Image (cartoon, rainbow, N blue to C red):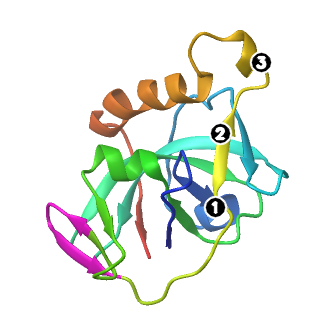
Amino acid sequence: MLVDSGSAVTLADERFMRDSKTLRDVSKPAIELKTASGPELEITNACVTEIAVWRSVTFRHTVLLVRELFNKILLGWDFMRYHGCTLDPTAGCLRMRQGNISFRKSHAVAPVMAESPQFELMAHHPAREAIEKMLPSEQESSGKSSKIKI
C-alpha cells in the first residue's frame, strides 16, 4: 500500500481487486487520471470496499480501479481527508484517530492528478465534484463490500 498525498483520489490495481470478494460497484466518475510525467491512467471501474490499514482497523472507502497500477492500493488525498488522516514525515507515520501507523519505508513517486478534458470551460473542477459526490454517500451506505488486507 502506498500513501500518496499528491494523488487526488484513492486507486486500486484492477488485477488485485479481481482476486477480492464481491465488490459493490459505483458509478465511474467522468475524469482523466494523469501522472506528473503526463501518461494517462485507465480507470476500469469504481467500487466501495473496506481497506485494512492496520490489522484491526478497516475503513470503508470508494476506490477507482486502474489498469496496471504498480501498487495494490494507493491511498489518495480523498481517503486522508475523509478519514481524518495526517501525514507526519518527521515521525515517519500516518496519524489517524484510531492511532498512528508507522511507515516501513518511503519512496519517491510521481503524483497522480485528476483532470477534466474541458477544465478551462468549467466553473468547478469535475474531478473535485465527482470526489465530493462519492465521499458522503458511498462510504456510509450499507451495501455489499469486500475487505482488502494489505
Left of 1 or right of it: where is 90?
A: left
CA–CA distance in space, label 1 to label 2: 24 Å
Q: Viewer-proximal residue, 58 or 113?
A: 113
Q: Where is residue 26 in the image (x, y as percent from the top left)?
A: 52, 33
Element class at badge 3: loop
Element class at badge 2: strand
Residue at the image point whose x is 23% and y is 68% from the top: 95
Disc 3 marks a residue whose amino acid type is Gln
Q: How many neighbours does mark 3 have within 10 angstroms: few (below 14), some (14-19), or many (20 or more)?
A: few
Tell me the residue that label 1 is attached to: 18
Element class at badge 1: helix
The part of the chain drawn in magenta is: 95-102
Tell me the residue that label 3 is attached to: 118
Left of 11 or right of it: where is 104?
A: left
The mark closer to the camera, 1 or 2, is 2
Residue at the image point whose x is 27% and y is 50% from the top: 83
